[in-house]
Amino acid sequence: MFIRQDIIKVCRQSVLCLLVSSTFLHSATAADKPNVAQLFTEKELQTATWIRDAARNDNLSYKILESLTTEVGPRMAGSPGDARAVAWAEAKFKELGFDKVWKEPVTYPTWTRGIEKAEIVAPFPQPLLITALGNSVATPANGLTAELVEFASLKEMMSAPIEKMQGKIVFINHKMQNANEYGLVVPGRSAGASEAARKGAVAIVIRSVGTDNHRFPHTGVMQYAPNVAQIPAAAMSNSDADMVARMIKRGKPVSLKLELSSAAAATYTSYNVIGEMTGTELPNEYVLIGGHLDSWDLGTGAIDDGAGCAITMAAAEFIKRSGLKPKRSIRVVLFANEEQGLFGGKAYLAAHQNQIAQIQAAAEADLGQGPVIKMASFVRSEALPLVKQMHSVLALLGIEPGDNNAFPGPDMGDLRMAGAASFGLSLKADDYFNLHHTPDDTFDKIEPARINQAATTYAVFAWMAAQAPINFGSGQELLKAAKK
């Protein structure tokens, strides 16, 4: 669903919000007209419009992210960087003036990377740039050498006969063309090792799950299926994948030597770090925003997901610094260990299972620096007129309206499945899969205008959701509606 062009033109003036809501009221049938008491007031719309205009050049998202990537750097779950990040987040929330700051424990198994080397040993010896996939086991101490067998996708490999893979290293060369293909390509990373092992392979090396052509391999988590042999798993850079494919096309057997010392490590307890701006009238109801604090170890986690942390922290801070006092609380959660299994999100749900109805709206930033290009919702039908008003304020930021079946983000996905009212603030991901999970995920890639727009969007969204005259809904009511 798209806003009509004539309404968008009207929205170019600050009076847009009032005109859109008025048009909606007069065009609705008598049966469909919302109660005026269930809409944002003129003053609230004016405040939201002011936030939109003022926050674009006066939010701290860029500075917060600079602080995180400079003072902490890589934050792989269970590492010393993880502990530094938790301390940084707790201190930063307090520095930014949040009313409440606390930590909630998250316990999970850890993994260490160690040595990672690979080289083609025949017929054309060359070194490769590879990285171990998260949770991969090690090779034998001196590495292993075997012939490569290439497949265009996980699906093609699973259809191949067992004898084609026995004693060999599987090479899945599934090229990701754009961000929309992530869901098609990533199963090769997450499940490829066990599927290859079922057919007798001794290791697997995949083409990196990314859209770049740089010589940087992309790491990422993989999981072993139970009761299947665990074989080493790695990713090679996309440029190396192209080169290896060209070797294979020459018709001679291509042998690869792989050496990894990665291994499972001890159980570790980290924390979801939480900051809250307390509401004035309904403090126990809250708008939930945030990102994940952990990152992979290859870069400094600027895009994935330091940006999400900075965007949401800055959004709440702007509201507080401006002297605005919303009815409901605004809670920012920086989740622990998303990268290796959504552990922080699962822990948050477990700790707040009985408080789903207190979540007015949930939205996570975890797809880079922005800008936000669409806002979808997951609310009860009575709240949809309010969502329309929210869209009317955000239209000038280039944000399109979405449907009412929003997904709030990876760490908040289970909350949505439990019935929490949710919003999907879709971030433009044109560069995200060039950078994420690589050494290239660094602060110099951040563009102030992009991250400022995203933080502004979250500020408008959080303020309006917190100020809404009615609850957006929760529980079985929303889940039943979603099935219709």
Image (spheres, helix red, strand yellow):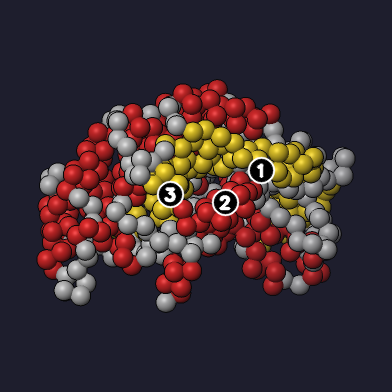
On screen, 95 above or below 185? above
Q: Residue at x 79, y 70 (%)?
A: 162
Give the mark count. Answer: 3
Q: Which of 430 and 1 is in front in this view?
A: 1
Q: How crowded is mark 1: few (under 14 residues within 10 Å), some or many (20 or more)?
A: some
Q: Amino acid under label 2?
A: His
Q: Which of 220 and 105 is in front in this view?
A: 105
Find numbered disc 3 in the image and state the secondary structure of the residue it sits on.
strand
On residue 352, the disc is: 2
Q: Nearer the viewer, residue 162 or 408?
A: 408
Q: Amino acid under label 3?
A: Glu
On screen, 382 above or below 220? below
Q: Which residue is drawn at 22% across and 65% down?
A: 34
Find numbered disc 1 in the image and state the secondary structure of the residue it sits on.
strand
**Quadrant location of the N terminus in the rendered image:** bottom left
Residue behind mark 3: 285
Q: Amino acid under label 1?
A: Val
For marks 2 and 3, give the CA distance. 12 Å
Q: Residues within 10 Å of mark 3 (few under 14, many from 20)?
A: many
On residue 106, the disc is: 1
Residue 258 pos. (x, y %): 78, 45
Residue 238 pos. (x, y %): 58, 47
Of labels 1 and 2, earlier in sequence is 1
Q: Which of 216 and 124 is in front in this view?
A: 216
Q: In which quarter of the image is residue 111?
A: top right
Question: Of tags 3 and 1, which is closer to the observer?
Answer: 3
Residue 93 pos. (x, y %): 48, 29
For marks 3 and 1, give the CA distance. 23 Å
Q: Name the outermost residue toward the right.
A: 141
Image position of 207 (left or right of 70)? right
